[in-house]
């Protein structure tokens, strides 16, 4: 091993065994004055000098650039294991892990973190599109990578966020189906006597999310008040390898109190009476407090109602009603549509649905506003005598 050294270059040498140039230099000192050294390697002497100077400049500015051999894959593995937990909901964490594993790492995992560029990120998105992945999947992959690289940028591991400056993904906004009032009436007529009638009616009249509905406890309901209300405080979710658990609602606006229509109050009272009979029938097998709460909607033995099972129940019930297969999310969407059809103000609809802002409500349900805009134009014609 031979060594060569230039002024201000630290120690630079050619490693014959590896066939590479290496450099070692001091980047800082410890509290007791001992030097902190860093080593870089490259194929040529000029390249190793450039890497050393870049590292020295980064150290002088307080940055700590990632090692040259740190791959995007290894960085992402560390990020999802050490940085994300506690900063996002468990279901979101699992989603991030899945997207990293299935979509980002196969495309960019072997790339070097410090040299990743916007063109490579854009190519990842293009490849996902070519493979037939949905626009939302493409958007999610870029968005998660952007969040991870934002952390890397904040920590000084990279000079800039390659995902943030890559081309974005256009995700078309589908106009979700909504039941008409006639369809809703047909559905309700068909499920008379079903043990989950109150659940579906609550979704149709209040637009609760599936997890919010299944996370309701009897203490959240004030059925005997002069103005009966329901308060959303938690959501029931399922996580692989964890099972069912209760979490906080989706966002701050999701924690909300809404007034109950009389028809929903009556259905919930009947449901409470029926549940007491189920408890007597189940005997010692009855679970008094599933997941620590006196849940409103349960299985016949008192356990929490699995969200996926509830979705399948909804599919069968709507098909049985002769109106086609509808998901719980479409029942929520239908609630918004019915509220708009009944001329309920958008702000009230937004608060009922638990959206973070009225703007989100307007964006999601813009197609439902067409009739209202047409009516506004007709009103102007009438006002001016045209």
Image: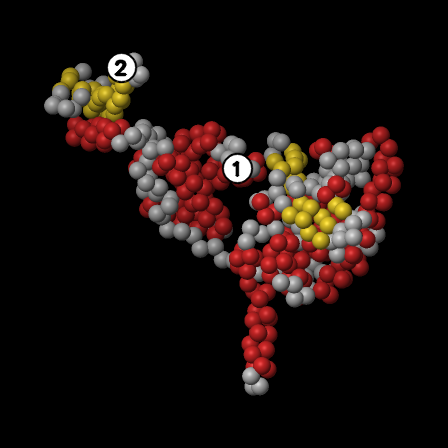
Observer-nearest residue: 274 or 315? 274
Label count reads: 2
Q: Position of residue 381 (x, y in %)?
A: 56, 81
Q: Position of residue 56 (x, y in %)?
A: 23, 28
Observer-nearest residue: 244 or 234? 234
Q: Is residue 328 visible?
A: no
Q: Where 193 sits versus 37, above or below?
A: below
> Is disc 2 placed on a helix, strand or loop?
loop
Marks 1 and 2, the one that precedes in the sequence: 2
The quadrant of the picture occupied by the C terminus is bottom right
Which residue is label 1 attached to? 88
| CB contact under 8 Å: marks 1 and 2 | no
The label number, if any, that marks residue 33 in the structure image? 2
Give the image quarter of residue 273.
top right
- Residue at coordinates 55% horizontally, 57% vertically from top-left? 358
The quadrant of the picture occupied by the N terminus is top left
Badge 2 crowding class, 10 Å Cα cut-off, few under 14, some 14 to 19, many 20 or more, is few
Q: CA distance from mark 1 to mark 2?
A: 40 Å
Is 258 displayed left or right of 91 in the figure? right
Give the image quarter of residue 116.
top left
- Residue at coordinates 67% horizontally, 62% vertically from top-left? 338
Q: Position of residue 199 (x, y in %)?
A: 74, 49
Observer-nearest residue: 148 or 272? 272
- Residue at coordinates 55% horizontally, 50% vertically from top-left? 356
- Residue at coordinates 74% horizontally, 53% vertically from top-left? 260
| Extreme-left residue of the structure | 7
Observer-nearest residue: 13 or 200? 200
Badge 1 crowding class, 10 Å Cα cut-off, few under 14, some 14 to 19, many 20 or more, is few
Q: Is residue 34 visible?
A: yes
Is 307 displayed left or right of 95 in the figure? right
> Is disc 1 placed on a helix, strand or loop?
loop
């Amino acid at each position: 091993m031979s060594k060569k050294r230039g002024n201000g270059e630290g120690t630079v040498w050619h490693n014959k065994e590896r066939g590479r140039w290496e450099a070692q230099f001091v980047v800082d000192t410890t509290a007791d004055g001992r030097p902190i050294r860093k080593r870089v390697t490259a194929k040529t002497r000029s390249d190793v000098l450039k890497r050393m100077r870049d590292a020295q400049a980064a150290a002088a500015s307080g940055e700590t650039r990632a090692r040259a051999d740190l791959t995007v894959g290894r960085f992402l593995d560390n990020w999802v294991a050490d940085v994300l937990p506690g900063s996002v909901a468990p279901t979101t964490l699992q989603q991030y892990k899945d997207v990293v594993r299935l979509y980002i790492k196969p495309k960019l995992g072997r790339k070097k973190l410090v040299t990743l560029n916007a063109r490579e990120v854009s190519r990842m998105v293009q490849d996902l599109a070519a493979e037939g992945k949905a626009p939302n999947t493409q958007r999610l992959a870029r968005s998660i990578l952007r969040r991870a690289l934002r952390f890397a940028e904040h920590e000084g591991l990279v000079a800039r966020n390659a995902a943030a400056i890559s081309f974005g993904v256009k995700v078309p906004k589908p106009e979700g189906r909504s039941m008409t009032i006639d369809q809703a009436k047909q559905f309700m007529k068909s499920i008379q006597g079903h043990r989950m009638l109150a659940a579906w009616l609550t979704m149709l009249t209040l637009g609760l999310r599936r997890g919010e509905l299944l996370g309701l406890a009897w203490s959240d309901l004030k059925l005997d008040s002069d103005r009966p209300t329901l308060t959303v405080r938690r959501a029931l979710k399922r996580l692989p390898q964890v099972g069912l658990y209760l979490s906080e609602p989706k966002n701050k606006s999701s924690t909300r109190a809404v007034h109950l229509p009389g028809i929903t109050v009556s259905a919930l009272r009947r449901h409470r009476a029926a549940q007491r009979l189920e408890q007597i029938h189940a005997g010692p097998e009855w679970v008094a407090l599933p997941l620590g709460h006196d849940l409103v909607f349960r299985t016949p033995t008192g356990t929490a109602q699995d969200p996926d099972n509830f979705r399948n129940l909804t599919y069968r019930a709507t098909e049985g009603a002769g109106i086609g297969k509808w998901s719980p999310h479409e029942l929520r969407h239908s609630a918004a549509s019915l509220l708009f059809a009944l001329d309920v103000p958008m702000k009230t609809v937004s608060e009922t649905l638990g959206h973070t802002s009225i703007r989100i409500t307007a964006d999601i349900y813009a197609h439902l506003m067409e009739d209202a805009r047409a009516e506004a134009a007709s009103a102007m014609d009438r006002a001016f005598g045209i």
